[in-house]
Amino acid sequence: MSDTKPHKIIIAIDGFSSCGKSTFAKAIASRLGYIFIDTGAMYRAVTLYALEHGAIRSGIVHEEEVVALLNEMAITFRFNPERGASDIYVNGDRVEGKIRTIEVSNCVSAVSAIAEVRHKLVAMQQEMGRKRGVVMDGRDIGTVVFPDAELKIFMTADPRVRAQRRYDELTAKGDNVSLEEIEQNVRDRDYQDMHRAISPLRQADDAIVLDNSAMTVEEQMEWVMERIEQARN
Ligand code: DC
């Protein structure tokens, strides 16, 4: 038994879209006093910028044009006490509210399949987690970004349950979307995320699976806190 404080670890949370990874990761980080990093927000920010700067036209992602834009994009995070999490900024503009639209969701898998995009964002993520004490959620955290993370969780849930959750979220914000459209997007992104050539979504060999289709946030927290205890000691 050690009498020192538990050391800071990296908690990697990967899994399918709309599983509640970010909500879960944020709750864990605030419980532990760790930094929470939503890596999906970074891929979304690049996608939004590409849409706004004409590198995606009629839904077609023009790779070389997206890559050219990368050099002029500075992505930063700033803690927002109201949300209890960091907001994402591009070149000083807060884009948090604009990155979760269906337009961005429809193009983000294609943008995140570009090697140069992944290269830049993975390097940033590794730097942010250098001192450990982070909870990072995404698709490749346990496999590529931090293969040495002390705790790796792979989240999954029924696609219908996930579509309903995202639909509730978007309609609560006043977005005019249909449940069918959302479910199609969830299924398409699952497929694209798992089948892309670089860093496809897959469960790390040493990850623990959490299927939260029928679990409350409290149940998930109880489940994870036990595993964190084990991983920290
Ligand atoms: O977690 P999210 O749904 O906000 O992520 C948006 C997209 O970004 C997702 O469809 C795949 C991509 N992504 C990725 O390729 N790698 C990550 N680490 C995080 C997200």
Image: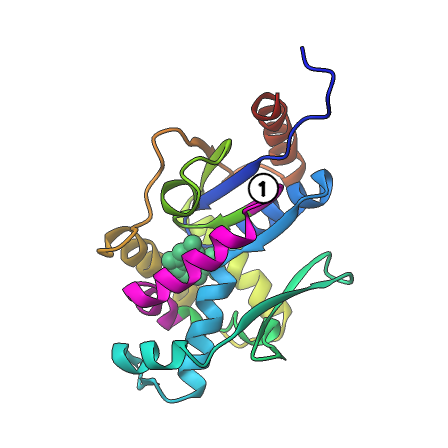
- Residue 103 appears in the picture as rendered: no
Find the magenta span and give its range. Answer: 106-135
Residue 148: % across, % down: 44, 35
Residue 7: % across, % down: 64, 29
Quadrant containing the C terminus is: top right
Residue behind mark 1 = 132
Answer above or below: position of 94 versus 201. below
126 or 197: nearer the viewer = 126
Residue 88: % across, % down: 59, 68
Residue 202 is one of the magenta-drawn residues: no
104 or 197: nearer the viewer = 197
Q: Dividing the picture into quarters, in which one does residue 189 lie?
A: bottom left
155 or 148: nearer the viewer = 148
Question: Left or right: where does residue 118 sit relative to residue 217?
Answer: left
The amino acid pointed to by label 1 is Arg
Q: Residue furthest bottom?
A: 54
Q: Residues within 10 Å of mark 1 (few under 14, many from 20)?
A: some
Q: Dividing the picture into quarters, in which one does residue 9 lie?
A: top right
- Residue 220 appears in the picture as rendered: yes
210 or 125: nearer the viewer = 125
Residue 17: % across, % down: 43, 54
Q: Which residue shows up at 50% across the image and 73% down it?
A: 101
Residue 120 is one of the magenta-drawn residues: yes
Q: Which residue shows up at 42% across the image and 74% down it?
A: 47
Q: Which residue shows up at 36% across the image and 72% down it?
A: 107
Quadrant containing the N terminus is: top right
